[in-house]
Amino acid sequence: MKNKAALLMQKVDFDIISYVCFTFLGYFLIGLPLAIIPIFITKTLGFSELIAGIVISLQYITTFLMRGYAGKIVDTKGPKPAVLNSMLFYVICGILLYLCHYFETNAFLALTILVLARLVTGCAEGMVGASPINWAILKVGKQHTAKAISFNGVASYGGLALGAPVGVIINQHYGLGAIAILTLVCGVLGYVFAKRKENIVSVAKRVEQSFMSVLKIVAPLGICLTLAGLGFGGISNFITLYYDYFEWKNAALCLTVFSSLFIIGRIIFSNAINKLGGIKVGIISMFFETLGLLVLFMATSPTVALLGAGLTGIGFSLVFPALGVKAVALVSDSNKGAALAAYGLFIDISLGITGPLVGGVISLFGMQSLFLFCSFMVLMGLFLCLYLNKLYK
């Protein structure tokens, strides 16, 4: 009996992985140029850190716009069309990145093309962000929602963890053009793989709720996620410039440590959501994330910075699934795709405002203020989460 149950759980795990692999691929392609773009904009093209932050964050404008559209597609037509569209967007992004590399001697033209590439990347992320999770949930059942969200988070940050250092290595040896070609090829392969999978459409009776009404329901939890996401956004967008400021090496390693500890945290502590409840886990997670960011702020060496990044990764690891499980539970079965898309908007908002907001803070108060500011924002999210824990009882 136990063996049968174990085999059943293994099948559930395999089914979930077979869908969230699209999330992994999507975020791997997002991660490839992530540690390179700030240096490319400031060192190769000669623009300021504020411009670099704005260009990086432009991606999240289109991600924000596409989330609602993707959620509607998932709930009415199934997740497969959204995933296919995302892969096509990655193909277009690869072409634009190659053009950016080709015209890099013309700073303004290259920057314009890079802006377009970031906007297209945002479309791709908006389409792939919640679609594979819903595909997996439709396949294995809503009772495995927490596991699907957790696996999807491992896939997304695992993709970033692998993509960032791979991108740095490829850029060092072959340049941005090679990253562009790899993006294009992976987009094509992802499209072919998704095309071969069966689409699944929810059979739940439709309870009509507009996307805006769903957004309003999940917004309090989403705001907590937005504030918590500023820690991750500060690391992912500015860690290369932070290391460059202190003349440290291996900034990509800091991203990898963050993402690796994020994955380990998801794997080891994922059951805590079912045992303690989503909001309580979110409170604990944001406490450790705040602590990690303060360690980064006080770091006097890259070794201590790695310790802070790892602690931040563990802290942030369960914020999304913990609050996400609660967000999905607040809506009907026929609107769960929209709920996940609406909830996911808030991490896009977080990462979207990180560039100009943190870039502005750096311009006014200096690079050394980066992680102090981020830790304060996450602390505000912790206090809000404490309030919501009382509100939802």
Image: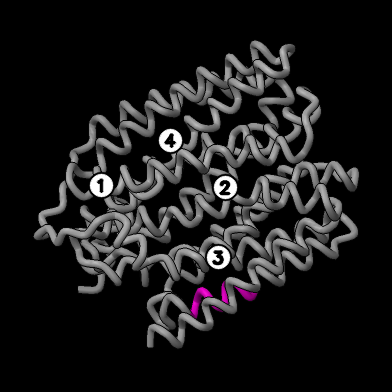
Residue 162's image quarter? top right
The span picked out in magenta is 280-287
Query: Would you name the residue on which mark 2 appears?
Result: 352
Image check: 325 left or right of 317?
left
In contact (CB < 8 Å): disc 1 and disc 4: no
Q: Is residue 312 above or below residue 169?
A: below
Q: What element carries label 4?
A: helix
Give whichever of discs 1 and 2 has the lower sequence position: 1
Q: Does the magenta stretch include residue 284?
A: yes
Between the residue at mark 4 and the residue at mark 3, the CA separation in whole angstroms equals: 29 Å
Between the residue at mark 4 and the residue at mark 2, the CA separation in whole angstroms equals: 13 Å
Between the residue at mark 1 and the residue at mark 3, the CA separation in whole angstroms equals: 32 Å
**Marking on residue 123:** 4
Q: Nearer the viewer, mark 2 or mark 3?
A: 2
- Residue at 42% in and 65% down: 219
Q: What element carries label 1?
A: helix
Image check: 375 left or right of 339?
right
- Residue 43 location, x and y as percent? 81, 28
Image check: 377 left or right of 341?
right
In contact (CB < 8 Å): disc 4 and disc 3: no
Q: Is residue 264 above or below residue 249?
A: below
Q: In this view, does 338 lie above or below 64?
A: below
Image check: 335 left or right of 66?
left
Q: Which amino acid does label 1 sit on?
A: Lys
Whether residue 143 is visible: yes
Residue 168's image quarter? top right
Q: Which amino acid does label 3 sit on?
A: Gly
Q: Does the magenta stretch include residue 376?
A: no
**Marking on residue 265:** 3
